[in-house]
Amino acid sequence: MPTFRHVPAAASLTLVLALVGCGQGEAGHGARLPDPQGSWAVESLTTGGRTLHAPDSAHLDIGPNQIKGNYGCNGFTAVAAFAGTSSVTVTPGASTTMACADMEFETAFAKLFRGKLTIDRGPDRLTLKTADGSTIAMTSAPAPTDAPLTTTEWTVESLVSGGTAASLPAEAAGKARFTIAPDLAVSGTLGCNRFSAQATVEGSTVTFGPLTSTRMACEGPAGEVERTLTALFGSGPLTAKVEGRTLGLTAPDGKGLTAKAASAAE
């Protein structure tokens, strides 16, 4: 009579496979539930039966009790109070007040991102839900690489006065650009006239030497922007701060500018 010695081995193999499968399931489950804290790129909003797709710059950097982000154009901060990983209560803080091209998305995002939000997590994804079922859908974002201060073409996007940033008038948008070369020679346009100067960099400060520029008569918004930038560049040491593709230059009196780094396609 056969002894069927292979039966216990098969049973053992089945048990091993079951244990391995269980471990894989737990690992897979863990991978599906990322920590809400981190950097997230906003993909879309769903509210009122509509889906609004996010601008590329819309994102959230979520910390233990503070959130920094961008509605797509304006930056903001908020206080976060987590209830484990199931929900977060958001209290809006400060934000810039620039007039932006896609104000519909900005306004909807600001309206949804406040109060108690339920957290749904998936593989590399995070969805925040409001009490009425509206959603903010996000995907994990790689840590941004700061653009270099030198060799980058910077396009002025807004003028800053104290805590308020105002976008450039439409007639002047995209026209004020400058580049700081490796030898710290500066060249570009103030929005109307081209200019050049020599910069000095010490730690986090940049000082522009006397500006040499062409002498076209510049009127209207472009002329106003040009006069403001000329005064700023000639005001002495400016604190420089690069975050991702955004440069801030700020004078001691709180006046300054924000500029965006040109992409490779530009």
Image: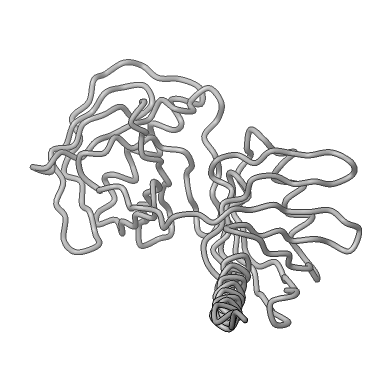
Percent of width and height locating residue 177:
34, 31
- Depth check, front residue: 82 or 189: 82
- Horizontal arrangement in the rendering, residue 198 relative to residue 93 (left or right): left
Q: Classify the position of the C terminus by image quarter.
A: top left
Percent of width and height locating residue 184:
13, 43
Residue 4 in sight: yes
Q: Classify the position of the N terminus by image quarter.
A: bottom right
Total marks placed: 0
Q: Which residue is drawn at 65% across and 74% down?
A: 79
Q: Which residue is drawn at 25% across and 54% down?
A: 236
- Horizontal arrangement in the rendering, residue 88 relative to residue 49 (left or right): left
Asked if residue 265 is positioned above or below residue 78 in the image, the reply reads above
Q: Residue at x 23, y 20 (%)?
A: 214
Asked if residue 262 is positioned above or below residue 160 in the image, the reply reads above
Name which quarter of the figure residue 103 lies in: top right
- Depth check, front residue: 10 or 88: 10
- Horizontal arrangement in the rendering, residue 97 relative to residue 239 (left or right): right
Residue 65 in sight: no
